[in-house]
Image (tube, rainbow, N blue to C red):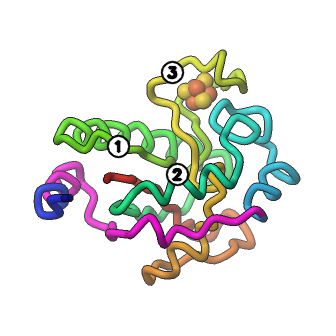
Amino acid sequence: MVNRAELEALFRKHGYADFKWIEPDNIVVGQWVRMKCVFGCAEYGRNACCPPNVPPVSECRQFFKEYRSGVVFHFQKRVARPEDRHPWTAEVSQALLKLEREVFLLGYQKAFLLFMDSCGLCPECPGTPEECKQPRLARPTPEAMGVDVFSTVRQYGYPIEVLKDYAQTMNRYAFLLIE
Ligand code: SF4
């Protein structure tokens, strides 16, 4: 049984106040998300945590069904230049990994983080799991796991829109699956 009060205190200790509890069974998974990865994403085949280096969509869907409780963390940001978004998301991912570790050490052995951007922990990604430089820290994005982030976070009242240019404020979401 998840101790929400204890975990929320931990989240706040790490500086996270904008989050919501979710039932992972409500996470919307779609084959169309994978198609967007395969066709049209520059990360395809170039990031060790992105397709094709992830399970099939059917297995991703099954993975989420093995959890009863999770949290979605909301982050907002405007960047001056498009290339500025990756250093920002990498920094957030590093911080969230520390939180995932602490949740695990509280006894939640299934704790698993999904980054809000493709794994950018290293300046250059060799592109294959075999060559990953930090395999203990590398995590996929929700999208890499077939998650329709738009439909999923809207269920919880969170904002998300297709942005027309990089000057607009981004709404980004990381997921922490707990139990
Ligand atoms: S940890 Fe580094 S090498 Fe591994 S997937 Fe992330 S960026 Fe690529």
Label drawn at residue 110: 1
How many residues crowd around disc 3 within 10 Å: few (fewer than 14), some, or many (20 or more)? few
Q: Vertically, is 137 above or below 69?
A: above
Q: Who comes first in sequence, dot 3 or dot 1?
A: 1
Residue segment shown in magenta: 9-31
Residue at 52% x, 23% y: name it. Answer: 135
Q: Vertically, is 150 above or below 55?
A: below
Q: Position of residue 145 (x, y in %)?
A: 62, 51
- Disc 1 residue: CB within 8 Å of ligand 1: no
Quick one: SS at disc 1?
loop
Q: Magenta span has 8?
A: no
| Kind of residue at disc 1 | Lys
Quick one: SS at disc 2?
helix
| Kind of residue at disc 3 | Gln
CA distance separating discs 2 and 1:
11 Å
Kindly report which numbered mark, 3 or 2, lies closer to the viewer in this rendering.
Answer: 2
How many residues crowd around disc 1 within 10 Å: few (fewer than 14), some, or many (20 or more)? some
Q: Which residue is mark 3?
A: 134
Q: Who comes first in sequence, dot 3 or dot 2?
A: 2
Residue at 66% x, 42% y: name it. Answer: 55
Q: Position of residue 29 (x, y in %)?
A: 63, 65
- Residue 118 seen in render: yes
Q: Who comes first in sequence, dot 2 or dot 1?
A: 2
Q: Position of residue 34 (x, y in %)?
A: 76, 55
How many residues crowd around disc 2 within 10 Å: few (fewer than 14), some, or many (20 or more)? some
Residue at 29% x, 36% y: name it. Answer: 101
- Disc 3 residue: CB within 8 Å of ligand 1: yes
Q: Quadrant of ligand 1?
A: top right
CA distance separating discs 3 and 1:
20 Å
